[in-house]
Amino acid sequence: MCPTGDMVEKEVDKFFNKGLTALDEGNWLRALQFFIKCHELDPAFMPAYHEIADIYHFNGQHDAAVEELKKALMVRPDDVESMFTLGTIYSALGRNVDALRVFKRIELLDPGFGPELHYNLGMAYKELDNPELALEQFNIALEMDPSYFECLEAIGRIHLDAGRLEEALTALLDVIEVDPAHINARHMLGVVYSRQKKWKEAIGQFEAVLSLAPDTDEALRELGMALSMAGDYERAVGTLKKAVEMNPDNLQARIDLGSAFIGIHNFDEALRELEQARLKDPGNPVIKKFISDVRDGALSIEGKGKD
């Protein structure tokens, strides 16, 4: 006797739920077997395709994930959930043209899909160096969900990269209002304040970043530079030393440390750091000029001392 439609549906549901339970238990291989069984029973059962693709993608088998979603779309060409998952995988792989094509197809099929579609469209445009179209999509997403702070963060980044500091500041402050512990937004706020030469505010933001993520060497470097620009050279030296210790390959941190040493007239240490930087980038004309200026400055001060 052939199984009825209701019997098949019950069997599919049973195996699908077993698969979800296996995933909850961390046994993705067993979960995969259950989801494949769902396929065998009902090739048109879309959730199984989505779960299998997620498993492949999570385990780094990106091509297999893409192929699984393409199979789903052969069965049901208008399945926007399969398209959306495929688009996000393309984005993760840096295949932004493919991602954009898929997301725009969803927009045609389901204009009310949700703010996450417009966020992903915006990110694809951003990665393809089309910031104006990216901003347009982020703003559509925010109209749908004003608390979508990932869009606000992306808007802040676009304005910051374009040098529109006030616009960046507005977007990033909105992110912090929604999520005070948002590390990237606080970091970018520190950069905005630094570019505005508001050193006290910049220092506060970089300190907030480091309280949340103490091992961020770039935040340490930027904090040290802000302290140096604010005239607190002693503290700047200590902070930049930590940045260099944390990441000896951070070339800019060594240059900034050399600059901070100059601020306290410790030219020997300044030259030592700058020479270390030159070893890492021998052809860098900026470092060579900096070393020459430090030597000239040190000689000038020594000459004044003799007078």
Image: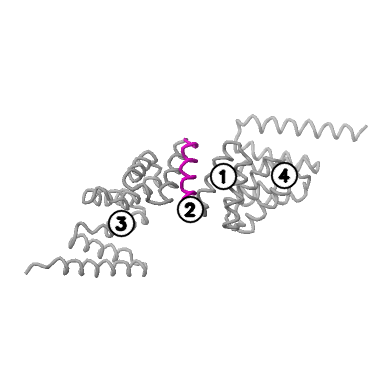
Inspect the image, locate mark 3, and give the three-letter code of the amino acid beneath it.
Answer: His
Closer to the chain start, of discs 1 and 2, is 2
Residue at the disc numbered 2: 145
Judge whether 11 appears above or below 141 on screen. below
User: Magenta-highlighted stretch: main secondary structure?
Assistant: helix
Of the numbered discs in the image, which one, if any, rests on residue 198? 4
Residue at 40% in and 48% down = 117
Inspect the image, locate mark 2, and give the three-letter code of the amino acid beneath it.
Answer: Asp
Spatial CA distance of label 1 from label 4 is 18 Å
- Which stretch is magenta? 130-145
Residue 9, how many percent across, how many down? 20, 66
Spatial CA distance of label 3 from label 4 is 49 Å
Residue at 91% in and 33% down = 306
Closer to the chain start, of discs 3 and 1, is 3
Q: Where does the C terminus fall, quadrant-wise?
A: top right
Viewer-nearest residue: 55 or 120: 120
Q: Nearer the viewer, mark 2 or mark 3?
A: 2
Inspect the image, locate mark 4, and give the three-letter code of the amino acid beneath it.
Answer: Lys
Inspect the image, locate mark 1, and give the three-letter code of the amino acid beneath it.
Answer: Gly
On the picture, is 10 further left or further right than 157?
A: left
Spatial CA distance of label 3 from label 1 is 33 Å
Residue at the disc numbered 1: 156
**Helix, strand or loop status at disc 2:** loop
Closer to the chain start, of discs 2 and 4, is 2
Check if mark 2's residue and mark 3's residue have beta carbons within 8 Å.
no
- In magenta segment, residue 185: no
Residue at 48% in and 53% down = 145
Q: Nearer the viewer, mark 1 or mark 4?
A: 1
Viewer-nearest residue: 132 or 86: 132
Residue 231, how many percent across, how many down? 78, 45
